């Protein structure tokens, strides 16, 4: 009976391990081809989301278009990404670059950020905003990939999310603007221990964020020009 119990326990543990491995493998994006300038499709769009934080080398009002078309802007962002992560900087997205892109991926968000960090602080998670919860979640995912780039540019220092998504009710309670970018999931207020707001702003300004300002304890950044419900104008203060 003891031996049977041990065999059962081992089988159960092995099944759990295999399930965890399978879940982890399943969470990785399935790149099926090498991408380069001229490519188009859903995989190019996913690439653009993941390299959006590498929009420029220095503060510049520019973004990586998430349109599924691999043009010069996407290639330049890929090269910056490759340089930052010690890869061959050729602008071609082959197996090594794809592996690094997937290394930044997590079933809970990205490597250094989780969806729960961006939940509305009134307990509504991603509900009750100006767009659906599913849209908020995808917008937050895009924000997290930009923040991964900001993190690298700040020397891989941990980033604290002071405020991510806000439900309409919570946004009203904290005195936010009625059309706050937070209510769409396209904004984050962050702080980085030991780093000045000015330095954080400079990192954000090369990472495709179009709305940026700082208060004493945080820096706000959002992607307002990229979305039809955004304010559609650059605002760096």
Image (cartoon, grey):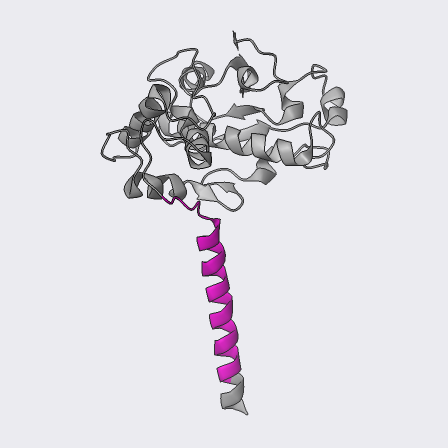
The residue under the point 25% across, 35% down is 87
Identify which residue, 158 or 32, lies in the foreground.
32
Q: How many numbered circles are shown?
A: 0
Identify which residue, 186 or 46, lies in the foreground.
46
**Is 162 situated left or right of 58 in this image?**
right
Q: Position of residue 207 (x, y in %)?
A: 42, 21
**Is 7 situated left or right of 131 in this image?**
left
Identify which residue, 171 or 47, lies in the foreground.
47
Q: Position of residue 231 (x, y in %)?
A: 61, 12
Q: Is 98 placed above or below 176 here?
A: below
Q: Is 122 placed above or below 180 here?
A: below
For the record, the magenta segment spans 6-32
User: Is 12 included in the stretch rendered in magenta?
Assistant: yes
The residue under the point 58% across, 28% down is 162
**Is 2 situated left or right of 165 in this image?**
left
Q: Position of residue 107 (x, y in %)?
A: 52, 47
The image quarter containing residue 187 is: top right
Q: Position of residue 95 (x, y in %)?
A: 30, 43
The image quarter containing residue 103 is: top left
Point out the residue furthest to the bottom here: 1
* Dominant secondary structure of the residues highlighted in magenta in the image: helix
User: Is 26 included in the stretch rendered in magenta?
Assistant: yes
The residue under the point 53% across, 12% down is 213
**Is 232 situated left or right of 48 in this image?**
right
The image quarter containing residue 97 is: top left
Q: Quadrant of the N terminus?
A: bottom right
Identify which residue, 178 or 139, lies in the foreground.
139
Q: Is 24 placed above or below 7 here?
A: above
């Amino acid at each position: 009976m003891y031996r049977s119990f041990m065999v059962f326990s081992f089988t159960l543990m092995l099944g759990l391990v295999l399930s965890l491995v399978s879940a982890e493998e399943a969470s990785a994006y399935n790149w099926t081809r090498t991408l380069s300038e001229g490519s188009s499709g859903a995989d190019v769009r996913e690439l653009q989301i993941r390299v959006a934080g590498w929009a420029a080398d220095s503060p510049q009002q520019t973004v990586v278009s998430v349109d599924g078309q691999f043009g010069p802007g996407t290639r330049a962002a890929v090269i910056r990404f490759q340089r930052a992560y010690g890869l061959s900087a050729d602008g071609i997205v082959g197996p090594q670059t794809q592996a690094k892109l997937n290394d930044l991926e997590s079933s809970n968000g990205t490597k250094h950020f989780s969806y729960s960090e961006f939940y509305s602080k009134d307990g509504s998670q991603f509900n009750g905003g100006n767009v659906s919860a599913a849209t908020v979640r995808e917008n937050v995912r895009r924000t997290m990939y930009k923040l991964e780039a900001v993190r690298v540019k700040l020397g891989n220092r941990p980033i604290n999310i002071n405020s991510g998504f806000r439900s309409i009710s919570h946004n009203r309670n904290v005195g936010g603007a009625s059309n706050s970018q937070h209510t769409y999931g396209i904004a984050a207020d962050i702080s980085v221990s030991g780093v000045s707001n000015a330095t954080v702003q400079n990192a954000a300004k090369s990472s495709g964020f179009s709305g940026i300002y700082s208060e004493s304890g945080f820096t706000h950044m959002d992607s307002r020009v990229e979305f039809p419900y955004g304010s559609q104008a650059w605002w760096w203060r």
